[in-house]
Amino acid sequence: MRILLIGEYSRLHNSLKEGLVTLGHEVYIVSGGDHFKNYDTDFSIKPILFSNYWITKKVRNAFKQFFNFDFEKIERAIRFYLILPKLKGFDHVQLINSDALELYPKVSLFFYKKLFTQNNKASLLVCGDETPVIEYLLKNEMKHSILSPYLNDSSLKKQYHFSLKYIQPNYSSVFNWVKDNVSSIIVSDLDYKIPMEKMNYKVNFIPNPINTQKINFSALKMDEKVIIFLGINRLSYSKKGIHFFEKALKIIEEKYADKVEIIITENIPYQHYISLYNKAHILLDQVYAYDQGYNALEAMAKGKLVFTGAEQEFIDYYKLTERVAINALPDVDELVKELSILIENPNEIIKIGKNARAFIEKEHDYVRIAKKYLEVWK
């Protein structure tokens, strides 16, 4: 099959591509690399003119502030328009979400119509914010979610602009057109499966693909100190509950000054990010999730102990009898308690790290997951 994957936010589509190529398929990715993360892509729509130069960035910011007009979206649209003639004759096209091109909604819809017309089947992947997901989370019926901070404090609305845009009429109309014109909707983890099903959508649940051939497992070795890593992305700071980790780490640093080393980074490219967390034993990911996102899964594949979503729903779905990650909660005292137990019992860190790698190999192997996508697409 010739397959076209549109959009990239976490390296999900890159890993899926690697699995599909291993199975003998021809696969191409179109994306902007997800801003500072710079993920690999075959056809880049990354806005360069209004992102890389000081003067044009100033112009862009001024227009965005005073006229609500974003030159980056225009540049991205022009770049997609120029490659659109090459994006034809594919057996399957998959959008990573309904805003996969990150354009103004009317422009996205214009391009989707052309893209779908000049190719065969299409699917929609829900692996992050999406119209029905946000609509359901706003009902506040889950124990917690990425919207919990906003639901508890409406003054955070500006920080949730990227999530809340999906319920605006122009964005929701794009979603409605897409869902009516795709042959399947796929969700990547329980944090999207649960809301989509609660909103009465029929979805195919396929776990995130992780390339276990590229990500080497390294059994953790406990030397003098336990190394804890926290990577901060300011765009998702509230959604991931990073401030809970920051507060917990201050307490841990005072409590175990001679036993821990803490590494904190902020908004750095993916490859640099990976190089820094490679030496860590513990990675702090997020506190509002039920299941693991891509960042957590890659760390688990390396044998790291990850604080992330691992709720009872996750344990029940995968029928787990041993911990493969620590269920991180939005509770500083609970985080400190869990970290303290691990620091004082380093063999438990090693054990859970091994469990994590075994879990990834069993449930997230990129070739096995690629086969599941092919089954759904067909």
Image (cartoon, helix red, strand yellow):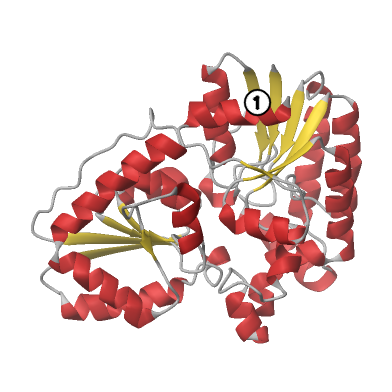
* Count of labels in the image: 1
Q: Is residue 51 left or right of residue 21?
A: right
Quadrant (top left/top right/bottom left/bottom right) for the C terminus: top right
Q: Hey, which residue is sitting farthest top in the picture?
A: 24
Quadrant (top left/top right/bottom left/bottom right) for the N terminus: top right
Residue 184 at what x, y percent from top left? 76, 38
Residue density around tag 1, few if under 14, some if 14–19, many if 20 or more, within 10 Å: few
The residue under the point 51% across, 67% down is 240
Query: Element at badge 1?
Result: helix
- Figure check: 71 above or below 209: below
Q: Which residue is mark 1?
A: 374
Q: Is residue 341 left or right of residue 12?
A: left
Residue 365 seen from this side: yes
Of residues 241 and 237, the one nearer the viewer is: 241
Residue 269 seen from this side: no
Q: Is residue 120 left or right of residue 219?
A: right
The residue under the point 19% across, 80% down is 254
- Name the kind of residue labelled 1 in the image: Leu
Displayed quadrant of residue 145: bottom right
The residue under the point 72% across, 65% down is 134
Of residues 351 and 6, the one nearer the viewer is: 351
Displayed quadrant of residue 115: top right
- Figure check: 248 above or below 355: below
Residue 4 at what x, y percent from top left? 71, 28
Residue 245 at what x, y percent from top left? 38, 72
Of residues 297 and 249, the one nearer the viewer is: 297
Residue 269 at what x, y percent from top left? 47, 48
